[in-house]
Amino acid sequence: MSVAARVAGSITWGLIAFLSVGVGGYALFHVATGFAHMPLTNPMLAPWGLRTHIAASGFAMITGAFQFHKGLRTKFKSVHRWLGRIYVTACVVGGLAGGTIALSSTAGPVAGWGFFLLAVCWVPFTLLALAAAMRRDFVAHERWMIRSFALTFGAVTLRLYLPIGAMTVGFEDSYPIIAWAAWVPNLIIAELWLRSRPNLRLRAKAAPVPA
């Protein structure tokens, strides 16, 4: 890999980590303050569901970003494994909690189904990454983890799109679109990036099929 490619990769990771820690830290701020700053305006939402989703998603964003730091993976493998366990647990808990409240969204059924299908993808993708690691198929593990974090990062892209939508067509009209745009393009970009990695494709073909 060229120096320019390594620098670009480091900058990209740094930006993703910065945004993930920022949004995840804000979510954990609500947890630390007992959600005192987050009024619940929808009586149809189960408070435990929303709060569990926020808490778990905060942990998922922070731990997930650092799972892609090459130095951490290679030099501190035990830390990588423990962060991975926290990430998987957070994604499963956050996804299940988010799925229970998604269809009660005050933004309507289009937004509700967008968030619900996000949860439907988020949980199994993460569990597939875990299953691949447990059978020591690290190529498949890496691929599924990239897809999983693309969905986790939807919490960040959601917040990037919200002010744009509010300033253009308005919050109410843009939110149902953002509920899909926050994660579907992320997943498409992740898949295109995986397909563009010839070394990763060759490793996948050469990897032994687990018994």
Image (cartoon, rainbow, N blue to C red):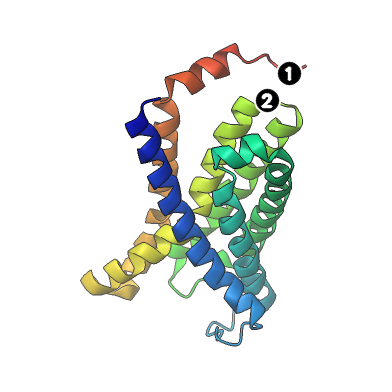
**Quadrant that contains the N terminus:** top left
Residue that appears at 36% across and 63% down: 160
Could you say which quadrant of the image residue 48 lies in?
Answer: bottom right
Q: Position of residue 28 (x, y in %)?
A: 60, 71
Closer to the N terminus: mark 2 or mark 1? 2
- Asked if residue 45 can be seen in this view, the reply is no
| Mark 2 nearby-residue class (10 Å; few <14, some 14–19, many ≥20) | some
Please indicate whether residue 150 sits to the left or right of residue 144 in the image.
left
Residue located farthest toward the left when viewing the structure as drawn: 168
Q: How many marks?
A: 2
**Quadrant that contains the C terminus:** top right
Q: Position of residue 39 (x, y in %)?
A: 55, 86
Residue that appears at 39% across and 26% down: 196
Q: Position of residue 76 (x, y in %)?
A: 68, 41
Disc 1 designates what residue? 210
Q: Position of residue 191 (x, y in %)?
A: 44, 34
Disc 2 + disc 1, Cβ < 8 Å: yes
Q: Is residue 52 above or below residue 132?
A: below
Q: State the SS at label 2.
A: loop
Please name whichever residue, 47 or 34, is drawn nearer the observer in this view of the structure.
34
- Mark identifier at residue 25: none
Disc 2 designates what residue? 137
